[in-house]
Image (spheres, grey):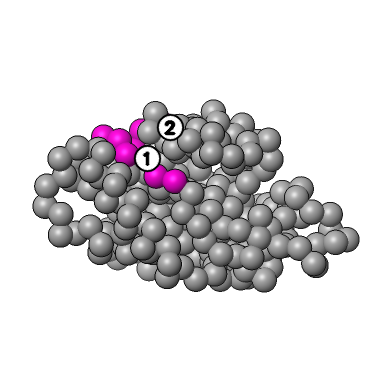
């Protein structure tokens, strides 16, 4: 699994990638500084991973916040058949931003219940029903809900167990350590250039990495190995995903 997300440092944006190994441990794969979270910056990050030895001829599960730049760069560097899971927390925030407060509870309940289902088609059906209900008075909320809906259910389509939904359904795996990076850099009041940003952020990531813990549900990661074609099902019980 590869998680990708961005952080802002002054006028600079840093895209970071965190990978999960076969034992469920997290590792910082790389960072890339840029003015914005655009496709060029993300492509540079992913190309750098490839040049440092990350194979691009195999399938990974990418977990992202849904930014078009991230999605496009993944296709360019790794191919169009890579499974992508969109962050459900970002989706919830985007939808709620388009709704009045009195509509929040109902929308949250429907979205969360849909994402708990193991059947992707049934989950999408429930979200579409919510979108139809919302579009009469809150068209922008319905449009936000429908955007990228299929990739909200990638974990279900891969037939992964519910024990993995929590770590795969959001970008929390990378956002949580990003707070550690922010904590170690927040005293910097002036970022001179991108090189300074990269030095500080890289150092902060290495310090934060020392406190990483295994992801929730890591004992069931072998099911992801099977889904990605990394391991035959008959031998899956003895192998965890890379």
Q: How busy is the neighbourhood of tag 2: few (under 14 within 10 Å), some, or many (20 plus)?
A: some
Q: Residue at x 58, y 53 (%)?
A: 1
The residue nearer to you, when weighing 234 against 49, is: 49
Q: Residue at x 56, y 64 (%)?
A: 25
What residue is disc 2 on?
Answer: 44
Residue 171: name its quadrant.
bottom left
Asked whether residue 41 is in view, the answer is: yes
SS for tag 2? helix
Mark 1 or 2, nearer chain start: 1
Q: Which mark is residue 32?
A: 1
The answer to whether marks 1 and 2 mark residues whose Cβ atoms lie closer than 8 Å is yes
- Residue 234 magenta: no
- Residue 37 magenta: yes
Q: Is residue 200 above or below residue 148?
A: below
Asked whether residue 130 is in view, the answer is: no
The residue nearer to you, when weighing 25 against 196, is: 196
Q: Position of residue 201 (x, y in %)?
A: 30, 51
The residue stretch that appears in magenta: 30-39
- In which quadrant will I find the C terminus? bottom right
SS for tag 1? strand
Q: Is residue 170 above or below residue 210?
A: above
Q: Is residue 156 left or right of residue 49?
A: right
Q: How many marks?
A: 2
Q: Is residue 195 above or below residue 163?
A: above
Q: Is residue 93 left or right of residue 57?
A: left
Q: Is residue 62 left or right of residue 11?
A: right
């Amino acid at each position: 699994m590869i998680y990708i997300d961005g952080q802002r440092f002054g006028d600079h944006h840093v895209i970071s990638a965190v990978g999960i190994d076969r034992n469920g441990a997290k590792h910082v794969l790389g960072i890339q500084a840029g003015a914005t979270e655009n496709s060029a910056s993300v492509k540079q990050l992913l190309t750098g991973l490839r040049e440092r030895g990350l194979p691009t001829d195999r399938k990974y599960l990418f977990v992202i916040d849904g930014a078009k730049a991230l999605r496009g760069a993944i296709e360019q560097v790794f191919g169009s058949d890579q499974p992508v899971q969109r962050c459900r927390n970002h989706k919830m925030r985007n939808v709620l931003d388009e709704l009045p407060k009195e509509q929040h509870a109902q929308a949250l309940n429907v979205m969360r219940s849909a994402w708990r289902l193991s059947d992707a088609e049934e989950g999408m059906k429930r979200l579409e029903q919510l979108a139809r209900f919302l579009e009469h008075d809150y068209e922008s909320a319905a449009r936000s809900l429908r955007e990228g809906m299929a990739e909200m259910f990638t974990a279900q389509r891969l037939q992964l167990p519910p024990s993995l939904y929590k770590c795969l359904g959001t970008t929390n795996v990378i956002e949580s350590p990003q707070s550690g990076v922010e904590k170690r850099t927040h005293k910097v009041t002036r970022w001179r250039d991108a090189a300074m940003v990269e030095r500080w952020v890289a150092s902060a990531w290495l310090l934060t990495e020392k406190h990483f813990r295994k992801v929730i549900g890591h004992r069931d990661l072998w099911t992801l190995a099977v889904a990605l074609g990394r391991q035959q099902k008959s031998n899956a019980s003895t192998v965890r995903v890379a």
